[in-house]
Image: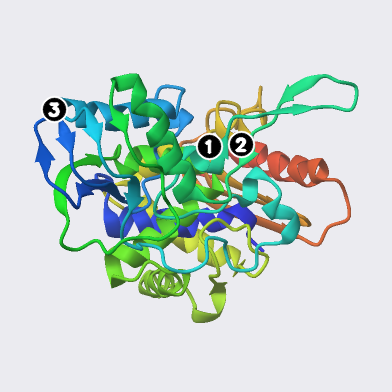
Amino acid sequence: MPASNQKLLTGATALTQLGPDFRFVTRFATNGPQRDSTLDGDLIVIGRGDPTFSDSMRAGDYRNAFHDMADSLSSRGIRRIRGSLRRAGDAFPDSTYGFGWQVDDLRTSSGAVVDELFVNEGLLPGRRVRANGDTVDAPIVIRDPAAAFLDALAAALPDRHITLDGSADARAALPDSGLLPIFELRSPPLSAILARMAKPSQNQIAEILFKTLALEKTGVGTADSARRVIERQLLAWGALPDGFAVRDGSGLSRHDYVTPETIVRVLDVMRTSRDFSVWYDALPIAGVDGTISARMKGTPAERNVHAKTGTVDKARSLSGYVTTADGRMLLFSFLCNNFTVPNREVERVQDAMLVLLASSRIGTH
């Protein structure tokens, strides 16, 4: 089980097939005319999975993205919407959960669902009252992404002096044909999104990239189509057919299986890619950032190792790149399963091996 090392397969395929400049496009349309400052119909959102309407990618507040949407309406002279806020299309028509995700995961932020309209990486701010009466910040896991998206847009409209006569209605998607376009929003590039996925190991962005690969390359944004896209890419890169079993994009599924040889193959292909700098910079850096920010500090591996972690119960992974003392880049993959010691003991061994490699002088042999 690779755990979140599965994101290496998803991210490498996305970067290769979509390119670092790929952007998600969210379209806004209507089914009625604009009469002076009034939109005489519904405001309809057609999403394709943009994962960047979030605190992390919108200057610390996901609501900034929705104010941008309201600003776009205002700039077109729209001050009133006679109808409702609706959604159209069905870019990701299958389950909003990943295959094999466990019930325990679905109660946490790790298991937040994804869909073509998506808000703040699956979380909304909230507060919880403890038994002793204290209140603590406790994010709310979103279970209906489309409803959360339209609710956030409805909340942003009054701030820009736009009146909504109807409601935010996410119950059924409208057909996305025959609508009158108003404007579209484009996301930051994939190069930025990739880093946001890899460094904190963000599951939902990985799942969106997984289904986006399917949508862009097969026209069907389902997990089954995404599996085939990634499997074909791995085989094209020279991975052995029995070296992988792809079930989701994030590695949260316990039905993902990958050999270290497959991961090293991916790392090596990316090492020779023209987009290697984007890939390399997106990975967590030992002692600096991401999920290994506190590891290998004060050693030759600090600021040297660029690697992806992975953690589910009884699986602890670390794969990436380390440079030796004489300047040679090495590729490594540690996939540790079914251990009974604490996670920190597995990490200690992984880190010790990388410190040894970073300290080594291999020469030309």
Amino acid type assigned to the residue bearing label 2 in the image: Thr
Q: Is residue 333 left or right of residue 77?
A: right
Helix, strand or loop under label 1: loop
> Which one is nearer the viewer's eye here, 64 or 17?
64
> Which one is nearer the viewer's eye here, 15 or 71?
71
The residue at 13%/30% (across/down) is: 76
Helix, strand or loop under label 3: loop
- Specify which label sits upstream in the sequence, 1 or 2: 1
Tell me the tag on residue 212. none
How many marks can you see? 3
Cβ atoms under marks 1 and 2 closer than 8 Å: yes
Badge 3: residue crowd in 10 Å (few <14, some 14–19, many ≥20)? some
State the CA–CA distance, disc 3 to disc 1. Answer: 45 Å
Q: How is the image coloured?
A: rainbow
> Which one is nearer the viewer's eye here, 190 or 170?
170
Tell me the tag on residue 291. 2
Amino acid type assigned to the residue bearing label 3 in the image: Gly
Tell me the tag on residue 77. 3
In front: label 3 or label 2:
3
**Which quadrant of the figure has residue 339?**
bottom right
Helix, strand or loop under label 2: helix
Q: Is residue 13 left or right of residue 298?
A: left
Q: Which residue is the site of mark 1?
A: 284
Cβ atoms under marks 3 and 1 closer than 8 Å: no
Q: Is residue 365 visible?
A: no
Amino acid type assigned to the residue bearing label 1 in the image: Pro
- Specify which label sits upstream in the sequence, 3 or 1: 3
Badge 2: residue crowd in 10 Å (few <14, some 14–19, many ≥20)? many
Percent across and percent down for residue 356 are 66, 39
The residue at 57%/63% (across/down) is: 98
